[in-house]
Amino acid sequence: MSARLFIPSDSAAVSVGADRVARAIAEEAGARGIALALARTGSRGLFWLEPMIEVDTEKGRFAYGPILPGDAPSLFAAGFLAGGAHPKALGLVDDIPYLKNQQRLIFSRCGVIDPLSLDDYRRRGGLAGLGRAVALGPTRTIEEVVASGLRGRGGAGFPTGIKWRTVAGVAAEPKYVVCNADEGDSGTFADRMLLEGDPFLLIEGMAIAAFAVGATIGYVYIRSEYPHAFATFSAALARARAAGLLGPNALGSGRAFDVEARLGAGAYICGEETSLLESLEGKRGQVRVKPPLPAVSGLFGKPTVVNNVLSLAATPWILAHGGKAYADYGVGRSRGSQPFQLAGNVKRGGLVELAFGATIRQLIEDFGGGTRSGRPVRAVQVGGPLGAYFPQRLLDTPLDYEAMLAAKGMLGHGGIVVFDDSVDMARQARFAFSFCAAESCGKCTPCRIGSTRGAETVDKIVAGRDRPQNIQLLRDLCEVLTDGSLCALGGLTPLPVLSALDHFGEDFANDRARAAAE
Ligand SMILES: Cc1cc2nc3c(=O)[nH]c(=O)nc-3n(C[C@H](O)[C@H](O)[C@H](O)COP(=O)(O)O)c2cc1C
Ligand code: SF4
């Protein structure tokens, strides 16, 4: 029997040479006359170890990394196909603490299976959730999701089951399920990893949603910067169709459901659900006034479920194990698990799926191992470009919806970006305004004009011009943005700005710039 080897084809691994490693190992095996069964997988999300390769041994999957193409001869010489000792050996992959200490409900198959093998997917529990949903019927399926306490993982945290119940209750046809895979938040990559590493999970989640609300058509809106994800997901769709999982009688449910993948329009605002719907309809991505909610009048004016990739991908587990089992994970009103994404100046960046309850410090110290630069952590931004910056003294804040809100922050899509003590927080505040100005859809004045005036005001403060008056002006402007913006792009830009001002006020006094110049 040929030895089984697994090399990720995830774009993060490919960006650091996974394809070249796969070629070098295949060539070396050929030269040595060794038969290899080489499978390309998604990534486990241990990015600092990529390209990380795995071999099947009697004791389990054994990992090596990070591997360079030039490592191929020494790996063979060390007998790596049987788990031989090598300077890049990492041991049994399941014993690597970064992985072992996670609670992977959504990402349990990612990096393990061939993403395009439905057999692999089924063998590892795939389609059990959809099977149970069909057995339960639409109403009880929705009640399971309500009971799970699942809240939207795209940023707003709205209860998924309630959204589905609303769509199910509207008498109109057709209905749509739209998956938001625009993933615009800085430092986030969980949607992409899932699309590349376990695409059938999303397809199953969408089929469950469609079955529950009575939708017949699904769209997945994938950001244009994700060509690998788009290709893998499109290939998975074709296979799901060929296997009868999608089509006129989706998985023998007696119901029609099909899904199309669409490339996004390259704007942050196209991740906002109503802009996304405009974009899907072929128009410019501009925010719609709510109400009506998309659940009532969404795509082409029809009832539409809009959910993030991770929300939909949680539902097969919920249906397979029961809503209560999911709700047993987590704290307070934050139930289940959250795939956190560690990025920025951190030693061990990657995906960390945990039940709600861990603190920022646990994430960046226990998992992340501190900064990559070796300098002290000074600020941590949680929740993407509209999220707050946390100083050292607030790093024990738990990463759940309520605790984040109480600390004047937000969880967003679970992105955590680490900065060391070389960061200039006045510049970060300015960046928040200029990001808002660049990405504003232009529909409302506080965001369109206020963002530009905000950047100018930060410049004046840092330059020392009427500092107390301009700081007050900045706070007033933030109030106008919070209260007067039509959507959360303008409405949440004050979070990074005010957290920078409140926790790192010294940077606005220009002391750091002066100190650097001296
Ligand atoms: C400016 C802006 C950008 C957003 N970008 C995304 C995104 O990239 N992905 C996403 O799922 N949700 C994004 N959202 C949230 C969506 O509007 C919406 O709440 C979400 O897709 C609903 O799905 P969920 O309930 O499963 O989270 C964004 C919101 C705003 C205001
Ligand atoms: S807040 Fe900004 S992005 Fe949102 S609707 Fe207003 S102008 Fe558009």
Image (cartoon, rainbow, N blue to C red):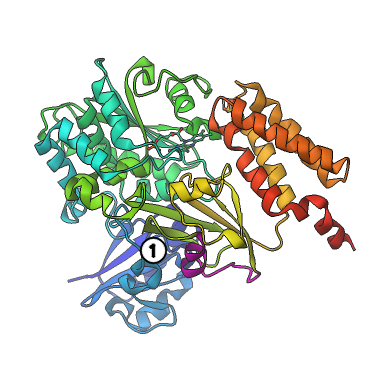
Sort mark 1 into few (<14), some (14-19) or many (20+) by Cα contacts within 10 Å: many
Query: Is residue 125 found left or right of 225 in the rendered image?
Result: left
* Residue 127 visible in this rendered orientation of the protein: no
Asked which secondary structure carries label 1, the reply is: helix
Q: Is mark 1 within 8 Å of ligand 1?
A: no
- Residue 418 location, quadrant: bottom right
- Residue 489 location, quadrant: top right
* Vertical arrangement, residue 472 with respect to residue 400, above or below: above
Instruction: Where is residue 182? Give x, y as percent.
Output: 46, 37
Q: Locate the N terminus and report the quarter of the image it occupies.
A: bottom left
What residue is at 32 percent from the left and 43 percent from the top? 150
In the foreground, 257 or 370: 370
* Vertical arrangement, residue 191 with respect to residue 163, above or below: below
Q: Quadrant of ligand 1?
A: top left
Query: Is residue 456 found left or right of 281 in the rendered image?
Result: right
What residue is at 61 percent from the left and 32 percent from the top? 482
Magenta residue check for 415? no
- Residue 107 location, quadrant: bottom left
* Residue 110 visible in this rendered orientation of the protein: yes
What residue is at 25 percent from the left and 40 percent from the top? 145
Instruction: Where is residue 401? Give x, y as percent.
Output: 44, 47
Query: Is residue 174 found left or right of 505 in the rendered image?
Result: left
Q: Locate the C terminus and report the quarter of the image it occupies.
A: bottom right
Residue under circle 1?
22
Q: How many marks?
A: 1
Q: Amino acid at mark 1?
A: Ala
**Boundaries of the magenta span:** 360-375
Instruction: Where is residue 254? Give x, y as percent.
Output: 10, 28
In the foreground, 360 or 28: 360
What residue is at 33 percent from the left and 17 percent from the top? 302
